[in-house]
Amino acid sequence: MTEIKALPTIIMVLITAGLLFGIGLLTFDKFSEVARTEIQVSDENITLSATGTWNLANTWIKASTISVENGTDGTAIASTEWNLSRIDGVLTFRTDAYNGTNGTITMINTTYKYGASNNPQTAIDAVSGGLDDLAAWFAVFVVVIAASIVLVLVTRSFGSP
């Protein structure tokens, strides 16, 4: 009977361990982003693709640091005219911005900062990757512990009075 009374404690320990594990993974992800070396890049006279996209040469773009201007006349292009996939480094223009009502933008200039990989960031990513691999096994641990609790309860119920 004492095993049944310990069951809520075991469940709370498992839930707490899972929460701490998840928080740790999120923290490592943020540390990885902050540990990157910030480098500024200027690209000029970039020709847009037929769909109005351009793949930046770098990834992990710092969204607040990018500026885009028309490559032919040098006027700034508002951020409402384009969308940045920060992690993939893809700059996509709205259809009417590069081929439509606002004229045709075929060439752009950009200036942006990105987070370059370095040794601390690589080490943090390695630890985070290892913890991520362990997370896949966490469900197995929970199932094994739950099965062992059920097995103990069943075998104790058939024991002597």
Image (spheres, rainbow, N blue to C red):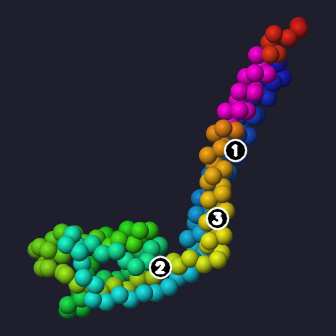
Where is mark 3, residue-wise?
126
- The picture places residue 81, in percent across and down from the top left corner, at 24, 73
Secondary structure, mark 1, is helix
- Is the residue under label 2 in contact with that under label 3 (CB below 8 Å)? no
Near-viewer residue (132 or 67): 132
Does the magenta segment cover residue 67? no
Residue 114 marker: 2
Where's residue 124, x and y in %? 65, 68
Alpha carbon of mark 3 to alpha carbon of mark 1: how far? 24 Å
Q: Quadrant of residue 9?
A: top right
Badge nearest the viewer, 3 or 2:
3
Specify start and end residues of the magenta stretch as a single range: 142-154
Marks 3,1: beta carbons within 8 A: no
- Between label 3 and label 1, give the one nearer the viewer: 3
- Look at 85% across and 11% down and name the residue there: 159
Q: Count residues near mark 3 (Cα–Cα under 10 Å), then give few for <14, some for 14-19, many for 20+.
A: some
Residue drawn at the location 71% of the way across and 32% of the way down: 144
